[in-house]
Image (cartoon, rainbow, N blue to C red):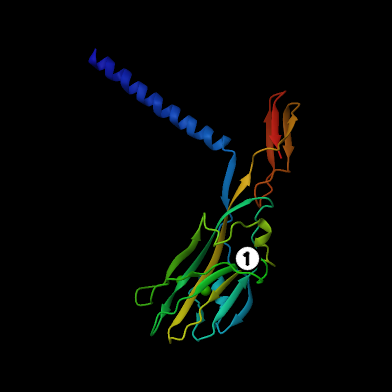
């Protein structure tokens, strides 16, 4: 009896695990909002520069460095080529900096962002890049829920004409700030709640190419039962 009882108990546990997995999968599919990020985008333009040596070297991680080495070094990077969908809710912005500080002193920088072509700037975030005596490192500033002091952003703020990253490395010391690469990532949420459009499908296979998933435009083949209804915006 005890053996049978244990088997029954094990069966119940296995069933519970299977049910949990099925529920978890369904939850993913019916989630009403979609949290997404753009992935890291590197700048492709030096909009303005005072004092930095080789500022464009920060476009790529290749151990060729943009260098701040004097008292007036300020650079503005632009043209990140973001494609944030219109109407998305902006959740956060993250900036990645790869590099190190070197020499007498510890030159760091203030990072700030503009959303209107340089007319206004966010609050600063001060870097904490390591000294070369250890090694270079990639460090992150901002995160998935950090709006850099602004109450909100809109997708248009990330256009190439509006969005820039400023790196202000003015410092009186003899140390240098050496940056191998910079990049930025935008976290956003797509509104997948109403209003939806619905369509009754006659049946068979129907192809639609007007689905909207961020920057992609996938073609999705739908095969439905006669009488099924699909919803989209
Ligand atoms: Ca490197
Ligand atoms: Ca580089």
Work out whether 98 lies above or below 72.
above
Image position of 128 (left or right of 199): left
Image position of 43 (left or right of 67): right
Residue that appears at 35% across and 74% down: 134
Position of residue 90 measured from the top left corner of the image (x, y, whole percent): 60, 54
The number of callouts visible is 1
Query: Dot 1: within a 10 Å radius of its alpha carbon, few (fewer than 14), some, or many (20 or more) residues?
Result: many
Disc 1 marks which residue?
80
Residue that appears at 58% across and 77% down: 75
Residue that appears at 48% across and 64% down: 141
Quarter occupied by residue 230 = top right
Position of residue 92 measured from the top left corner of the image (x, y, whole percent): 55, 56
Quarter occupied by residue 229 = top right
Judge: label 1 CB < 8 Å from ligand 2: no
Position of residue 206 measured from the top left corner of the image (x, y, whole percent): 73, 34
Work out whether 6 lies above or below 110.
above
**Which residue occupies the foreground of this view, 106 or 202?**
106
Say which quadrant the C terminus sits in: top right
Work out whether 120 lies above or below 103.
above
**Which residue occupies the foreground of this view, 222 or 181?**
181
Q: Secondary structure at mark 1?
A: loop
Residue that appears at 43% across and 28% down: 18
Toward the top, the furthest residue is: 1
Position of residue 61 measured from the top left corner of the image (x, y, whole percent): 51, 70
Say which quadrant the N terminus sits in: top left
């Amino acid at each position: 009896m005890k053996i049978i009882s244990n088997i029954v108990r094990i069966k119940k546990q296995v069933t519970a695990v299977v049910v949990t997995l099925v529920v978890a999968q369904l939850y993913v599919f019916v989630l009403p909002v979609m949290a997404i990020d753009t992935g890291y985008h590197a700048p492709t333009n030096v909009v303005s520069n005072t004092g930095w040596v080789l500022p464009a070297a920060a476009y790529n991680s290749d151990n060729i460095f943009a260098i701040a080495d004097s008292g007036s070094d300020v650079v503005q990077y632009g043209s990140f080529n973001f494609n944030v969908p219109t109407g998305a809710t902006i959740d956060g912005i993250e900036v990645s900096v790869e590099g190190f500080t070197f020499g007498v002193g510890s030159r760091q920088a203030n990072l700030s962002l503009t959303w209107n072509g340089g007319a206004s700037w966010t609050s600063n975030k001060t870097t904490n890049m390591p000294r070369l005596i250890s090694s270079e490192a990639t460090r992150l500033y901002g995160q998935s829920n950090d709006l850099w002091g602004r109450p909100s952003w809109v997708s248009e703020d990330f256009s190439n004409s509006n969005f820039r990253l400023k790196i202000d490395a003015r410092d009186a010391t003899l140390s240098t700030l050496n940056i191998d690469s910079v990049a930025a990532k935008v976290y956003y949420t797509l509104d997948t709640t109403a209003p939806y459009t619905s369509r009754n499908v006659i049946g068979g296979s129907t192809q639609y190419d007007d689905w909207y998933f961020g920057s992609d435009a996938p073609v999705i083949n739908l095969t439905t039962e006669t009488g099924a209804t699909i919803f989209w915006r």
